[in-house]
Image (tube, rainbow, N blue to C red):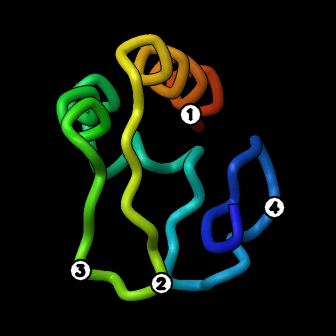
Amino acid sequence: MSCHAIGRSGASPRAEAPPFRTLGQRYRIEALEEALGEGLTTGHPDMPDFQFSAEEVGEVIAYLNAIQQR
């Protein structure tokens, strides 16, 4: 939230961080399930590592699908 726009509108606080509502233009949202379940890590120094339970993964995927720009 401190880097990415997480809702249906608004700019990301960091210009280089894509809004979550546009992730479907770069990735198939369901393809993110494995990364979320195994632990989301990145070489980006400002992004923390994330670990989600199976239930949380499903919730994140559902949310991302719900806000995608069509």
Left or right of 55 in this view: 49: left
Q: Which residue is mark 4?
A: 10
CA distance separating discs 2 and 1: 24 Å
What's the CA distance linking mark 3 and mark 2? 9 Å
Tell me if mark 1 has few (under 14), some (14-19) or many (20+) residues whose alpha carbon lies within 10 angstroms of its own.
Answer: some
Q: Is residue 45 above or below residue 41?
A: below
Query: What residue sits right under mark 2 in the picture?
Result: 46
Please give the residue where the numbered disc 3 appears in the rendered image. Answer: 43
Query: Residue placed at 34% from the left, 31% from the top?
Result: 29
Disc 4 packing (10 Å; few <14; some 14–19; many ≥20):
few
Of badges 4 and 2, the one in the foreground is 2
Disc 3 and disc 2 in contact, CB within 8 angstroms: no
Local secondary structure at mark 4: loop
Gap between marks 1 and 4, in whole Å? Answer: 13 Å
- Residue 27 percent across, percent down from the top left: 27, 43
The quarter of the displayed image where residue 32 is located? top left
Q: Tag 2's secondary structure?
A: loop
Relative to residue 5, is residue 9 drawn left or right? right
**Label 3 or label 4, whichever comes before in sequence order:** 4
| Spot occupied by residue 52 in the image (x, y as percentages of width and height) | 41, 32
Q: Which residue is mark 1?
A: 68
Give, as a three-letter code, the residue at label 3. Gly
Badge 3: how crowded within 10 Å, few (<14), some, or many (20+)? few
Three-letter code, disc 1? Gln
Q: Check contact, mark 1 vs mark 3: CB within 8 A.
A: no
